[in-house]
Amino acid sequence: MTDGMNEFERLAGGHIQALGVDIMQVNLGLRCNQSCTHCHVQAGPERTELMDEATMALVLGAAQALRPRLVDITGGAPELCPVLRPLLDGLFHAGLAAQVRTNLTALFEPGQEDMFEFYRARKVGLVASLPCYLEENVRAMRGSGVYERSVAALRRLNELGYGQAGRGDDALTIDLVYNPGGAFLPPGQCALEADYRRELLARHGLVFNRLLTIANMPLGRFGEGLRRSGQEAGYRELLRQSFNPATLDGLMCRRQINVGYDGALYDCDFNMVLGLRVNHAAPGHIRDFDADLLRGRLVMTGPHCLACTAGGGSSCGGELVAVQPTAE
Ligand code: SF4
Ligand code: SF4
């Protein structure tokens, strides 16, 4: 490499620069009650990595100083980390919008009986993974019983007012997340959302706000599965061939910062998995948080970034540009 750029940057036409810090994403740790086949952080019941109270307090302080548009909490299963509740309390009392990425089934784990009400009382937005509206596909990716418990959790959330129309200040939002069940790209988000809406209503009487489609990263457990099945090279080639320059402006790393469970700062959760901290010119730990230095930092990219720019693009907020349905 002679131009100092990696393969992704050469396709992108240069380095990627951040444009602000509108979203603070916080990873509370890798413990999860599930062990999904597509999990990029390889979360599971045996993982012990969790954010501690001192780090959570630093996160809260940084969020209060930064006042991001959204604090987006992820894991693992955030509910299984003891600092989730004090963090949400602190954000709520500071008047900051918070969202939790839940797998739904963690809401039925011991000690979580009041979590539905806890979320509602603090107006926490929810993003729930449900990789298909069909039970057999969810079972293959997430294990038996997951679909039934996910439906039960969605029903309870609907009863509490989640998922009804509107996204105003008082709306209780629940968005669903689709991941492909193999080495292929997600279909267009808009058309798939219509399918989810129709099928979940007809089969279970369930409603939700938006569907987010997210491409699988060739990392973690999904990456291992690709290697085991001899599909890694093919999947990476698919990402390369599907590069779409129209996705570059919307890349989530350009407007967010990710805080790992140990307080280290990353451009995104995928870089956290790879141990790629924010550019050395910006502070690398929450204790040194400096929004001004982070806002215009150069993003740390690599070949994995091609999963964010393939087809309609992919981010924690779903597709980046609309994919038109192909004519039959
Ligand atoms: S994908 Fe989500 S629910 Fe599944 S193991 Fe990973 S963190 Fe847990
Ligand atoms: S993987 Fe992370 S750093 Fe790379 S393009 Fe996607 S969001 Fe940005």
Image (tube, rainbow, N blue to C red):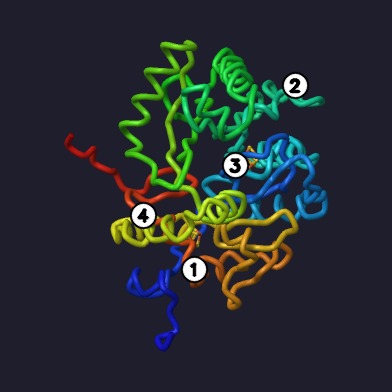
Label 2 or label 4, whichever lies nearer to me, is 4
Q: Does the residue labelled 4 lie within 8 Å of ligand 2?
A: no
Inter-mark Cα distance, 3 to 4: 21 Å
Residue beneath disc 1? 301
Residue beneath disc 2? 114
Q: Can I make out residue 114 in this image? A: yes
Q: Residue 268 at x, y = what percent?
A: 55, 57
* Closest to the observer, 161 or 234: 234
Inter-mark Cα distance, 2 to 3: 29 Å
- First in sequence, mark 3 or 4: give its number: 3
Residue beneath disc 3? 37
**Residue type pointed to by label 4:** Ala
**Residue type pointed to by label 1:** Thr
Label 3 or label 4, whichever lies nearer to me, is 3
- First in sequence, mark 2 or 1: give its number: 2
- First in sequence, mark 1 or 4: give its number: 1
Q: Which residue lies furthest to the left in this view?
A: 327
Label 2 or label 3, whichever lies nearer to me, is 3
Q: Is mark 2 within 8 Å of ligand 1?
A: no
Residue beneath disc 4? 310
* Closest to the observer, 209 or 172: 209
Q: Which residue is drawn at 47% across and 23% down?
A: 134
| Label 1 crowd bin: few (<14), some (14–19), many (20+), radius 10 Å | many
Q: Residue 260 at x, y = what percent?
A: 68, 56
Res 8 → quadrant: bottom left
Q: Give SS at disc 2.
A: loop
The answer to whether 286 appears left or right of 233 in the picture is right
Q: Give SS at disc 1.
A: loop
- First in sequence, mark 2 or 3: give its number: 3
Q: Residue at x 61, y 63 (%)?
A: 274
| Label 2 crowd bin: few (<14), some (14–19), many (20+), radius 10 Å | few
